[in-house]
Image (spheres, rainbow, N blue to C red):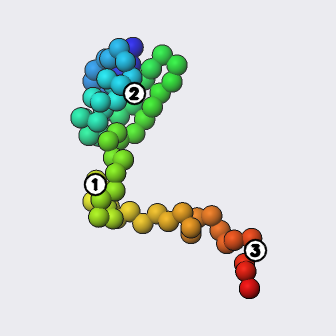
Amino acid sequence: MYNVICNDVELENFITLNEAMAYAKSVGTFVTIKGPEFEIVGKFGVDSVRDGKCPDGVAYDWNKASRIGRVKRERV
């Protein structure tokens, strides 16, 4: 059994994790999915970037190259 919880209020119960995640996406807010052995938290369904913006309108500016540091050996 998977429970979808928002602000300490249980919204729905589902038999499968897929059903619970689909419902969490439709809610559109931060939720907790509590399963028999684990919990998943987050705002589901915000997994795309279009035109440089996240679904909530925030600019997506993450750049892997700037996060890994300088290369160890530069060619001359």
Q: Quadrant of the C terminus?
A: bottom right
Distance in Å between CA atoms under marks 2 and 1: 22 Å
Type of amino acid at the residue the image marks with label 3 = Arg
Type of amino acid at the residue the image marks with label 1 = Asp
Disc 3: which residue: 73
For residue 33, the mark is 2
In the rendered image, residue 48, in percent from the top left (x then y), is placed at 34, 51
Is residue 26 positioned above or below 58 on the image? above
Is residue 32 positioned above or below 49 on the image? above
Q: Is residue 31 left or right of residue 72?
A: left
Distance in Å between CA atoms under marks 3 and 2: 45 Å
Tally of numbered discs: 3
Q: Quadrant of the N terminus?
A: top left
The nearer-to-camera label among 3 and 2 is: 3
Secondary structure category for the residue under label 2:
strand
Q: Earlier in the sequence, mark 3 or mark 2?
A: 2
Q: Earlier in the sequence, mark 3 or mark 1?
A: 1
Indicate the quadrant where residue 4 lies.
Answer: top left
In the rendered image, residue 73, in percent from the top left (x then y), is placed at 75, 74
Secondary structure category for the residue under label 3:
loop
Disc 1: which residue: 56
How packed is label 3: few (under 14 Cα within 10 Å), some, or many (20 or more)? few
Confirm whether residue 10 shows in the render.
no
In the rendered image, residue 32, in percent from the top left (x then y), is placed at 39, 31
Is residue 15 positioned above or below 22 on the image? above
Indicate the quadrant where residue 59 lies.
Answer: bottom left
At horizontal 29% and vertical 64% (from top left) the residue drawn is: 51
Residues at discs 3 and 2 in contact (Cβ within 8 Å)? no
The nearer-to-camera label among 3 and 1 is: 3
How packed is label 2: few (under 14 Cα within 10 Å), some, or many (20 or more)? many
Distance in Å between CA atoms under marks 3 and 1: 40 Å
